[in-house]
Image (tube, grey):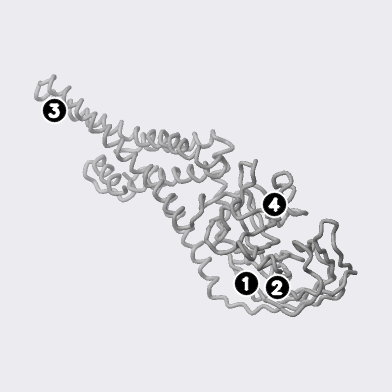
């Protein structure tokens, strides 16, 4: 009954149980953190704005993004994935979300940043609805834990408008 | 199912209560679940699942079988001793035969219990999460540094609409292994509510249009198997190692069987 095998077995099971419990506690401890992130985005320039041969509007813009996401980091945070999406409605689509820029923040030290960039992914509409279109820029972030539950949230920044004419 | 297994173990201990022996089925069951997870992930879904149970059923049988063999041997020895004192050989043979049948039946029942309970847990998870495969193992590095090879993801498939930024698991026509990537573009129809989704791996340079079927520009709802909600590092290595180096699996099973044989009653 108290042979080597059973003891090893018991030790293994016990250590796995403890490990699982610690993982669960680490994941639950994230709930105590109430983050207060902030973000500002400026559209500095519309580089070009045209209709593709297949009829879809495409726009290229230069953005100035500054954000402070330090409060998202806890001891169980592996990284924060942050991205800026343009969101708008068209007659055909009730929601269009287009990611313009994204980045991975590996640690708290890098969580307060300022970046000047043109859009990383192409801003293409399904159709030709972008002239004079009002859209929101939304800063989304997805917190990836070292272990446990992933969480996400966003800041919506409304009131941006595309030019009325192609350029 | 634990009850039956524990009772059996107690019997094999000749009435000595043992708190450790009851862990045996846990490990066997864990292996069973691992086998199920592995098969669902690495191979195609329905076809192989039953095969996996079967295969593992045999392995489990090995573990239990050897303990039962030992049990049987000691029981036989006892009977034989009784028989010599009584001197009634024919009756003994009959009783051995009946004993054997009972042993085999007990073995079959407890084996069935272990396999079914593993299946019940799996199916219950499927019901709760609404996903065909609630737990998947990451096989590639396209989502690094977020997800590395060997990490485990817990999936959830709810009715909620798919939004940009979510990490989804999707099947592409003509590809056997599902892919875990992040949604970067969403277009949701006004009238039907259907969605067009574009994905990209965090660690990839470009979006996933090259991975999709030829000429496919968007993923639709039916391609998507679930979204990742939870994350557990490293655990998936067990299944990866077992799949890629089957010899290790057999060594493990063999060691387990050997442990059962060599340990005292």
Mark 1 sits on what residue? A153
Foreground disc of the pair 4, 3: 4
Q: Would you say the residues marked 2 and 3 are in contact, meaning their CB atoms lie under 8 Å apart? A: no
Along the line of sight, the residue nearer the viewer: A142 or A148: A142
* Nearer-N-terminus badge (4/3): 3
Q: Is residue B165 visible?
A: no
Foreground disc of the pair 3, 1: 1
> Label 2 neighbourhood size at 10 Å, few (<14), some (14-19), many (20+)?
many
Residue at the (75%, 78%) spot, across then down: A40
Q: Give the side of residue B229 with respect to residue B125, left or right.
A: right
Q: Would you say the residues marked 4 and 1 are in contact, meaning their CB atoms lie under 8 Å apart? A: no
Quadrant the C terminus of chain A occupies: bottom right
Estimate the x, y position of residue B198 in percent, counting from the top left.
70, 57
Mark 4 sits on what residue? B142
Q: Residue furthest top?
A: B90
Quadrant the N terminus of chain A occupies: top left
Mark 3 sits on what residue? B82
Foreground disc of the pair 2, 1: 2
Foreground disc of the pair 4, 1: 1
Mark 2 sits on what residue? A138
């Amino acid at each position: 009954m108290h042979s080597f095998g059973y003891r090893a077995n018991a030790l293994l099971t016990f250590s796995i149980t403890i490990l699982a419990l610690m993982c669960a506690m680490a994941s639950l401890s994230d709930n105590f953190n109430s983050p207060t992130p902030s973000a500002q985005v400026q559209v500095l320039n519309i580089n070009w704005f045209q209709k593709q041969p297949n009829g879809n509007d495409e726009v290229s813009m230069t953005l100035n993004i500054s954000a402070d996401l330090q409060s998202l980091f806890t001891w169980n945070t592996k990284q924060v994935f942050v991205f800026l999406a343009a969101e708008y409605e068209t007659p055909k689509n009730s929601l269009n979300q287009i990611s313009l820029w994204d980045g991975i923040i590996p640690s708290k030290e890098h969580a307060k940043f300022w970046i000047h960039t043109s859009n990383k992914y192409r801003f293409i509409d399904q159709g030709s609805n972008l002239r004079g279109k009002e859209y929101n820029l939304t800063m989304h972030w997805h917190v990836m834990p070292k272990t446990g539950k992933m969480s996400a949230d966003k800041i919506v920044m409304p009131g941006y408008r595309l030019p009325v004419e192609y350029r | 199912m634990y009850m039956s297994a524990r009772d059996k173990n107690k019997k094999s201990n000749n009435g000595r209560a043992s708190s450790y022996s009851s862990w045996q089925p846990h490990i066997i069951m864990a292996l069973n679940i691992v086998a199920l997870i592995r098969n669902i992930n690495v191979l195609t879904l329905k076809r192989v699942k039953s095969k996996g149970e079967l295969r593992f059923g045999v392995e489990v049988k090995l573990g239990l079988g050897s303990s039962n063999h030992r049990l049987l041997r000691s029981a036989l020895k006892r009977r034989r001793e009784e028989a010599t004192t009584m001197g009634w050989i024919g009756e003994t043979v009959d009783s051995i035969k009946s004993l054997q049948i009972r042993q085999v039946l007990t073995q079959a029942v407890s084996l069935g219990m272990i396999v079914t309970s593993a299946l019940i847990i799996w199916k219950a998870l499927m019901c709760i999460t609404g996903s065909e495969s609630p737990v998947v193992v990451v096989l590639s590095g396209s989502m690094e540094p977020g997800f590395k090879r060997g990490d485990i993801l817990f999936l959830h498939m709810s009715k909620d609409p798919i939004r940009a930024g979510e990490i989804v698991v999707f099947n592409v026509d003509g590809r056997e292994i599902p892919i875990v990537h992040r949604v970067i573009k969403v277009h949701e129809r006004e009238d039907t509510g259907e969605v067009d989704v574009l994905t990209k791996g965090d660690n990839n340079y470009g979006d996933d249009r090259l991975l999709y079927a030829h000429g496919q520009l968007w993923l639709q709802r039916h391609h998507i198997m679930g979204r990742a909600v939870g994350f557990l590092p490293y655990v998936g290595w067990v299944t990866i190692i077992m799949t890629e180096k089957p010899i290790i699996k057999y060594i493990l099973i063999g060691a387990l069987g050997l442990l059962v044989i060599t340990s005292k009653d």
